[in-house]
Image (spheres, helix red, strand yellow):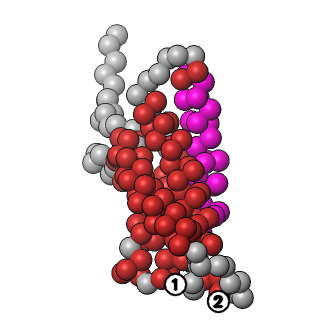
Amino acid sequence: MTSITASAPTTKRRARIPRKTRFDFWFDLVMLIAFTLDYSFRFTGLAVHEWVGLIFIVVIPVHVVQHWDWVVRTTKRIVRRKPGRDTLRWVVDLLLMPSMVLCVAAGVLISQSALPAIGLHPFRDPFWTGLHTTTADVTVFLVAVHVALSWRWGLSLIKRIFRRKASV
């Protein structure tokens, strides 16, 4: 005896995106927007530039902690002399960390708006101003390279997050 079964239409099922990955994506996107806004201080003004810059004191460590598993995994692979395509990104990130930390620290030391508004009066010194300007330029370059090297990850998540369910 033969039975006839109706086959259900085949649709691609969306793979579930882990909560941590979704948070990483949105946090990184907000961080990139904040960084772009912060670097546009001629547009936003000095006060906004300084307050957004101060936010990076918290945002940078959170970003590193969120991606620490990648840092450890990639570092182990490099140490075992098995470099992969993430090696360049690892080197860029290694250079980016001190550059961004120095940029934020020097920015705090030369604050003319945010810190005086809360009663702190940092000193003005051409060395710190020069360090802030130089590390800001280096940081912008390294962030651009970092984003470019991470583009595939971001684009695949955008596609997965915003993909519409197939019509039945």
The quarter in which the C terminus is drawn is top left
Q: In the image, which disc is placed on residue 10?
A: none
Residue type at the position of mark 1: Ala
Q: Which residues are magenta?
A: 55-77
Which residue does the image show at 53% across and 73% down from the upper left? 126
Residue matched to label 2: 117
| Residue situated furthest front in the rendering | 126
Answer yes or no: is residue 26 visible: no
Q: In front: 86, or 27?
A: 86
Residue 62 located within the stretch drawn in magenta: yes
Residue 141 position (above or below residue 4): below
Q: Are marks 2 and 1 in contact (CB under 8 Å)?
A: yes
In the visual, does 149 lie left or right of 71?
A: left
Residue type at the position of mark 2: Ala
Q: Main secondary structure of the magenta part?
A: helix
Which residue does the image show at 65% across and 47% down from the upper left? 65
Q: In front: 99, or 164?
A: 99
* Distance Cα–Cα, label 2 vs label 1: 10 Å
Residue matched to label 1: 47
- Residue 166 is situated, as x and y percent measured from the top left of the image, at 30, 46
Residue 136 located within the stretch drawn in magenta: no
Classify mark 2: helix, strand or loop.
helix
The quarter in which the N terminus is drawn is top left
Q: In front: 80, or 13?
A: 80
